[in-house]
Image: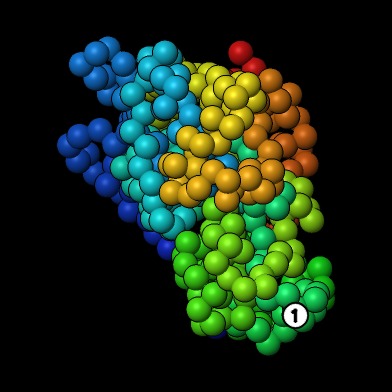
Amino acid sequence: MITKRNRIALSAGLTLVAATALTACSSGSGGSTGAGTGTGTESGSTDGTTTVRMATLPWIGYGPWYVAEEQGIFEENGLDVEQTNFNTDADLNAAFVSGNVDVANVATHTALLMQQAGVPVKIVMIEDISTTADAIVVPSGVGSVEDLAGKRIAYEQGTTSDLLLNYALDSAGLSIDDVTPVPMAASDAGAALIGGQVDLAVTYEPYISTALEQGDDLELLFTAGELPGLVSDVLVVSDAYLESNPDTIEALVESWGAAIEYYDSDTEAARAIIAEAVGEDPEALTTAFEGVEYYTREENATELGGAFSEETIPLVLEAAESAGIITGDVSLEGLVDTSFVEG
């Protein structure tokens, strides 16, 4: 069973990764480290574009980046973006903190975890908020969150699924100690439910749609929309990379904005691009896309330094602390850099 002590160990693991990266950097080892804690010098390609290494997950909320790639938006903004997909949050976080990637797409609470671990990081843009694209998936006979007591629950520890599950349990007067956690990657949780290995699963799209399509009599019991902003995503950059490559970050923000404009102008085509990138059928993800709200460049200009910083981030911090995911001090001062979305 995953206890609060296990979550403290998870947080400590991120701290250890951060400390290792810091030590490696300060020891004067050769080569630039691009992200995490390195100097972050730009890498130019032979055609004059700037190469930037981006860490991502097969989550539709990050889909506009695939649109930017497919539609030549990165190239128009002088970028060659190398997107690396990771299967778990832990692998993505480790790659970012150790400097193997330059920028990362992460959940808001993950950015807070990095800050807690001493990683010098900035949130430079809001990407999305999930409403029904993160959810607790159950057999139709489960009628309420109270019915989860004693159930075997598949979810990925330390992720948005963990956050959502704990919030749901707390809303029903339960805690993680009232259920039997079965830790696994979000990509495997739905399959475990269908296969009868667990009683229910907490996961996100496109895995929710796959489970609903392949499983018998499955439905959504509790979604992220119960507390808007609880499950949200941001683009993070290390302080060092940000200082050395401001033009690259500006170009990334511009690219995201242009990709959202394309998404709004030809939604069907954009969804097809995203669906192919995450390995799903566009028609099967119709409902999934409706459960995600993308942030435009204009919305970022008003919301990142406004309601998102003043309301959403503190809300996520409180929920993560209540869940035992964040166990140390987190300073919100200086975590958000609005300069790239306000320009």
The quadrant of the picture occupied by the C terminus is top right
- 13 displayed left or right of 198: left
Q: Position of residue 130 (x, y in %)?
A: 67, 47
Residue 107 higher or lower than 49, as above or below: below
Q: Position of residue 19 (x, y in %)?
A: 38, 53
**Closer-to-camera residue (13/218):** 218
Q: How many marks?
A: 1
Residue at the farthest left position: 30
Residue 196 higher or lower than 68, as above or below: below
Identify which residue is drawn at 20% across, 34% down: 31
- 47 displayed left or right of 164: left
**Closer-to-camera residue (326/167):** 167
Identify which residue is drawn at 22% across, 39% down: 28
Q: Would you name the residue on which mark 1 appears?
A: 141
Residue 316 in sight from this viewpoint: no
Q: Could you say which quadrant of the image residue 142 lies in?
A: bottom right
Q: Disc 1 on helix, strand or loop?
A: loop
Residue 269 in sight from this viewpoint: yes
Residue type at mark 1: give it: Gly
Residue 316 higher or lower than 149, as above or below: above
Q: Could you say which quadrant of the image residue 78 lies in?
A: top left
Q: Position of residue 311 (x, y in %)?
A: 78, 41
- 327 displayed left or right of 308: left
Q: Could you say which quadrant of the image residue 338 lies in?
A: top right
Rate crowding at label 1 as few (under 14), some (14 to 19) or many (20 or more) other CA atoms within 10 Å: few
- 341 displayed left or right of 251: right
The quadrant of the picture occupied by the N terminus is bottom right
Identify which residue is drawn at 68% across, 38% down: 293
Q: Position of residue 129 (x, y in %)?
A: 67, 43
